[in-house]
């Protein structure tokens, strides 16, 4: 799920998304899949299956390794400080 302090500001152009994360001061360029995943995580905790379902229909063909790709996005989001495990304590004060 998104970190409690991840008050993201979004802008979209076609299939590209820019997300500003005020606590870090960082701006991130996302493709459609990453944006869908981040928006789904904003709704609350999700399983890999939930997240795979969130990105279904992007592109013209099924991607057999989509769970691995989703896991890769999650690692990236975690490295950026945008998400935390659902059972992790909140860092917001």
Image (tube, rainbow, N blue to C red):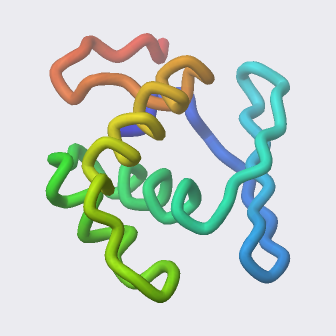
Provide residue 58's location: percent of width, then percent of height.
48, 79
- Residue at 73% in and 59% down: 10
Compared to residue 80, the image places residue 38 above or below, namely: below
Q: Is residue 5 above or below residue 18?
A: above
Q: Is residue 48 left or right of residue 79?
A: left
Question: In the rendered view, does 40 fall on the left or right side of 16?
Answer: left
| Residue at figure coordinates x 79%, y 49% from the top left | 29
Residue 76, image x and y in percent? 53, 29
Question: Residue at coordinates 42% horizontally, 52% vertically from top-left?
Answer: 42
Which image quadrant for residue 15? bottom right
Q: Quadrant of residue 56?
A: bottom left
Q: How many marks?
A: 0
Location of residue 55 with respect to 45 vertically, above or below: below
- What residue sits 78% from the left and 71% below the top? 12
Q: Residue most toward the bottom?
A: 60
Q: What is the x, y in percent for residue 52?
A: 27, 61
Looking at the rendered image, the quarter that the N terminus falls into is top left
Locate residue 72, reporting x and y percent.
43, 35
């Amino acid at each position: 799920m998104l970190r409690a302090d991840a008050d993201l500001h979004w802008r979209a152009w076609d299939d590209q998304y820019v997300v500003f994360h005020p606590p870090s001061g960082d701006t991130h360029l996302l493709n459609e899949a990453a944006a869908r995943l981040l928006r789904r995580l904003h709704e609350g905790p999700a399983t890999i299956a939930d997240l795979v379902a969130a990105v279904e229909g992007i592109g013209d063909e099924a991607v057999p390794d989509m769970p691995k790709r989703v896991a890769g996005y999650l690692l990236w989001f975690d490295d950026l400080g945008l998400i935390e495990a659902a059972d992790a304590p909140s860092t917001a004060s």
